[in-house]
Image: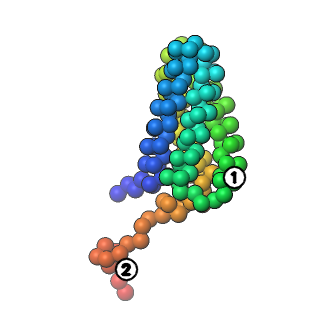
Amino acid sequence: MLRIPRTVIGFALINGLTFAVDLSLVSVAHGILRMPLASAVTIGYAIAFSLAFVLNRRFNFRSHAPVGLDTLRYVPVVAINFGVILLGVTVALDAAGVQYQLARIAAGVCEAVFMYCAMRWFVFRATAEVNDAPAPQSGRAARLRRPSG
């Protein structure tokens, strides 16, 4: 049976929420206030990535490392994600004629894969390994799995 790590589910829930915040801010800033798309994406992302860091650190990866160390690992990940994936893909697709919200959603899919991997194996690596470890078996299930002999 396929086992999905708990952190994948938590990441999907938290980042789904923060992505909705991000897209809403981009829509208001660019669509209503007529800010340039790059500026609107920057504002939306800055607020969303800060919220995502706090929520993922506390509720998903449950990091107990000093916040400064987690932040030092998170900042370069965010910078790479922002410059290459988020802004690059969004602006390139918009320039190609894709509606900006759809361009942002496409970039969001790329971003989700990159950010989960970076958070799981780099930013919160120690706590993610503990949180994703299988729960110890007890009772009848443990006895049935125990090798004989």
Question: In this rendering, which labeled residue sits more in front, label 1 or label 2?
Answer: 1
Which quarter of the figure has residue 63? bottom right
Q: Is residue 92 above or below residue 147?
A: above
Image location (x, y in percent) of residue 68 = 69, 52
Image location (x, y in percent) of residue 62 = 53, 57
Residue under the image location 56 percent in, 19 percent down: 29
Which quarter of the figure has residue 49? top right
Residue 141 visible somewhere in the drawing: yes
Image location (x, y in percent) of residue 64 = 59, 60
- Name the quadrant of the N terminus: bottom left
**Residue position marked by numbered label 2 in the rendering:** 147
* In the foreground, 130 or 18: 18
Disc 1: CA contacts within 10 A as few (<14), some (14-19) or many (>=20): few
* In the foreground, 2 or 17: 17
Asked which secondary structure carries label 1, the reply is: helix
Q: Is residue 62 above or below residue 50?
A: below
- Name the quadrant of the C terminus: bottom left
Asked which secondary structure carries label 2, the reply is: loop
Which amino acid lies under the numbered mark 1 shown in the image of this protein? Gly
Which amino acid lies under the numbered mark 2 shown in the image of this protein? Pro
Instruction: Residue at the far bottom: name it.
Output: 149
Q: Mark 1 and mark 2: span between their CA atoms?
A: 45 Å
Residue 93 visible somewhere in the drawing: no
**Residue position marked by numbered label 1 in the rendering:** 68
Q: Is residue 4 above or below residue 135?
A: above
Which quarter of the figure has residue 141? bottom left
